[in-house]
Amino acid sequence: MTVKTVRIAMNGVTGRMGYRQHLVRSILAIREQGGLDLGDGTTLWPEPVLVGRRDHAVRALAERHGLDHWSTDLDAVLADPSVEIYFDAQVTSARVTAVRTAIAAGKHVYCEKPTATTLDDSLALARLARDGGIKSGVVQDKVFLPGLLKLRRLVDGGFFGRILSVRGEFGYWVFEGDWQSAQRPSWNYRAEDGGGITVDMFPHWEYVLHDIFGRVTSVQALTTTHIPQRWDENGKLYEATADDATYGIFQLEGGVVAQINSSWAVRVNRDELVEFQVDGTEGSAVAGLRNCRAQHRSATPKPVWNPDLPVSESFRSQWQEVPDNGEFDNGFKAQWELFLRHVMLNEPWRWDLLAGARGVQLAELGMKSSAEGVRLDVPELAL
Ligand SMILES: NC(=O)c1ccc[n+]([C@@H]2O[C@H](COP(=O)([O-])OP(=O)(O)OC[C@H]3O[C@@H](n4cnc5c(N)ncnc54)[C@H](O)[C@@H]3O)[C@@H](O)[C@H]2O)c1
């Protein structure tokens, strides 16, 4: 077995996503399993080069995990020809400039979503990547979640018959930050810093709907800021200038209607933080992050509307758990492995910067639809 090292500049690894999901649960996890077997007698060994703005924070991370390479000088890291891939999980507003620089330096690029806050910027990145002949990838982790993998299995197996509708409910209460600290960084609630739930979540809904049910062809959204003031990491009061809830209706190619509520101002009365109910002529299913329950038409009860009588049956217990039938790896790691295989072996890959731009397009059109109070077509993007 030959071992091939791939050096990856990882920027934004002191953040929530960069550290936990990308560094620890993906790249370090691949090292813990002995590298990535490329299947051609080669094991790929990822060598992260941690990049960040704050010297002490990046060094502390490197020391904690016994990593030898870290820097606060992104330009110098990108000028190093031994670094092949640039990864970005910085705050959204810092992404475009850094990704542009990495593409100009000839690095393959993998980054968090959204790739930008405007469609123009996200398309420009996709074009630069194409023109530069580099490979690109955008994190689209939700389709690698066990619950959604099981849902996709039901779709692929024809379980639903004709799919009619998708109802998604996403969200939880994000504390305001006064008497209990907020569990999300404050930039998420400031539009000027790249925040907002539409720009954060519509990119996810775009690829979830597109990959499993069909491309989104129209959007109608109502976005709002339910909590207008919050307290930041230093306990300072600030104006929440970004939307913290967005209620969207999407038409999909093939006729499916999807409706997804996303909110950071909702208390959870569901089994999981996100759930999608799919109804089809032959059956229905409810998928969350991990679980998926289904009900076939042959086992569908016949409730009769009568408010004078107490509920006589337990509707939730009438669903059947969809079995795992296999092991599910961490979704971020699974996508990293596919990206590395794409870079090294040229294997097929569809989650590139153009796919990332589709997510930004949906967010931008969602915001516009809300501002104008209209339903908008979502044109198919091309480079
Ligand atoms: N795929 C997902 O499910 C998912 C979930 C949450 C967030 N995200 C995305 O990941 C990215 C990071 O989000 P997060 O929640 O980890 O954020 P975070 O605030 O925890 O981390 C941000 C990182 O960017 C760095 N940074 C660079 N420039 C900065 C600046 N000017 N101001 C502040 N920080 C700066 C920080 O040091 C830190 O390492 C965002 O683009 C977000 O949309 C993706």
Image (cartoon, rainbow, N blue to C red):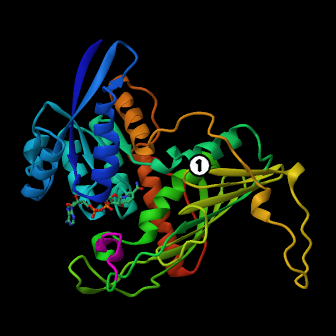
Q: Residue at x 55, y 45 (%)?
A: 146
Residue 187 horizontal/vertical position (percent): 29, 72
Height in image: 343 above or below 119?
above
Q: Is residue 137 magenta?
A: no
Horizontal side of 128 relative to 372 (left or right) equals: left
The secondary element bearing badge 1 is classed as: helix
Residue 84 horizontal/vertical position (percent): 21, 33
Q: Is residue 383 visible?
A: no
Q: Which residue is mark 1?
A: 147
Q: Is residue 189 magenta?
A: yes
Q: Residue at x 59, y 49 (%)?
A: 147
Among the 4 quarters of the image, the one containing residue 190: bottom left
Residue 217 horizontal/vertical position (percent): 61, 58
Q: Residue at x 79, y 64 (%)?
A: 315
The quarter of the picture where the N terminus appears is top left
Horizontal side of 123 relative to 274 (left or right) equals: left
Residue 109 horizontal/vertical position (percent): 29, 42
Q: Amino acid at mark 1?
A: Gly
Query: Magenta part mainly helix, strand or loop?
Result: loop
What is the span of residues highlighted in magenta in the rendered image?
Answer: 180-190
Name the foreground residue: 273 vs 93.
Answer: 273
Label 1 environment density (alpha carbons within 10 Å; few <14, some 14–19, many ≥20): many
